[in-house]
Image: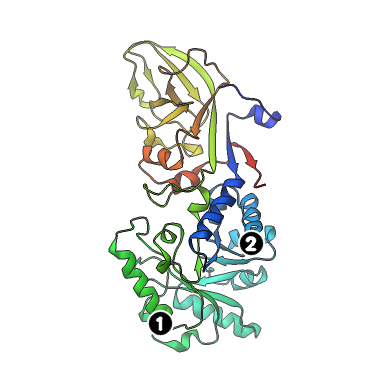
Amino acid sequence: MHIFFQDAASARAGAWMTVSLRAIAENYDLVAGLAPEAECAAVVKADAYGLGAAQVAPVLAARGAKTFFVAHLDEGIALRAVLPDVRIFVLHGFMPGCEGSMQAHGLIPVLNDPEQVRSWKRFCEKNKQAFPAALQFDTGMSRFGLSPADLQDRTVFEGLNLQLVMSHLACADEPDNPANDMQRQRFVDMAARFPGVPRSLSASSGIFLGPEYHFELIRPGAALYGIAPSEGNRMLRPVVSLDARIVQIRTVEAGDRVGYGLSWTATEPTQVATLGLGYADGFFRAQEGRGAVWHDRTRLPVIGRVSMDSISVDLTDAPADLEAGDVLSVLGPAQDVDALARSAGTIGYEVLTSLGSRFHRVYVPAA
């Protein structure tokens, strides 16, 4: 496929990623519509799952999102510079001594253990103001959050200006897993200790489990970016396409070997294309012998090991007139994020957040 380049930067690029802000906005509408009685927040941690929080978050805010979640304090500081008037929760809370930075940027810590609770209370008392906070409960994932035992002493939480209590489902991508209902019941019991405080249990996959998991606030992340909550549920709009240019085409003879370790051997004369992306760009080494790129609807297998900056592709089934500079599809209509992830034995989340910074990026406006 030949392509028209809009500017010098795109003409120089070996690969470019197109992000549809319109599709992200439509996915937000779709997910919000599944829980009409709940507030629909937006999770933009990890630079909006690798797609660019500075570009994505304003679109979500314009669509109606008033609450955002990030993982780290620095992510919150960066987001605050983009969105001055929204609520921003920091899922990891804060490192010791960073309470002042949290408050100075108007960020809300999610308090995950008794020491964070005590530190935040001391900071608020010192400043004679009850700054907002949230509590996370451990309902069975054994990762972040306060345990039921941590909640026994009610005085620990007195004086907190709580905006939210929350937890996280471990198996929401498995709708029939009994752990989902077990965690939901535990969450209800733990949240009952804080009457009147809004509750949030469901991130992307949990939202699709049904209204009993929605409570007062839902937290979509991956769903906004087109990742299906389960294999049988593909109602979300695809958000990302990724195209790579052919750097070189050569013919290898029968018996010639390709790539590091010489792990692939030609059994007949074969046209091989080298593309300028590799594991530094999120095309994983595990995709050796399993991954593929596409020319329209024709699958072109990756052969040999994936290098840091390049992959080799078997052009046996490709049109004969392909040449250096032509374009093959890595993510697109024939292969979405989840399909590419399966070829690496991983999940779409890892693919999205691993896409490197070397691609030329194009953002399709939301309107």
Question: Quadrant of residue 299 in the image?
Answer: top left
Question: Quadrant of residue 85 in the image?
Answer: bottom right
**Dot 1 crowding, Cα within 10 Å, few <14, some 14–19, many 20+:** some
What percent of the width, then of the height, locates residue 66? 62, 65
Q: Is residue 128 left or right of residue 90?
A: right
In depth, the one of 110 and 233 nearer the eye is 233
User: How are the colours assigned in the image?
Assistant: rainbow
Work out whether 340 lies above or below 258: below
Q: Residue at x 43, y 69 (%)?
A: 167
Q: Nearer the viewer, mark 1 or mark 2?
A: 1
Q: Is residue 309 visible?
A: no
Residue position for label 2:
77
Work out whether 110 lies above or below 230: below
What percent of the width, then of the height, locates residue 94? 54, 68
Q: Is residue 238 visible?
A: yes
- Quadrant holding the N terminus: top right
In depth, the one of 203 and 140 nearer the eye is 203
Q: Residue at x 41, y 30 (%)?
A: 292
Which residue type carries mark 2? Ile
Q: Is residue 170 left or right of residue 55?
A: left
Q: Residue at x 52, y 13 (%)?
A: 321
Q: Is residue 117 left or right of residue 256?
A: right
Q: Secondary structure at mark 2?
A: helix
- Disc tally is 2
Distance from label 1 to label 2 (Cα)?
A: 30 Å
Question: Quadrant of residue 127 in the image?
Answer: bottom right
Q: Which mark is residue 151?
A: 1
User: Does label 1 or label 2 sit earlier along the sequence?
Assistant: 2
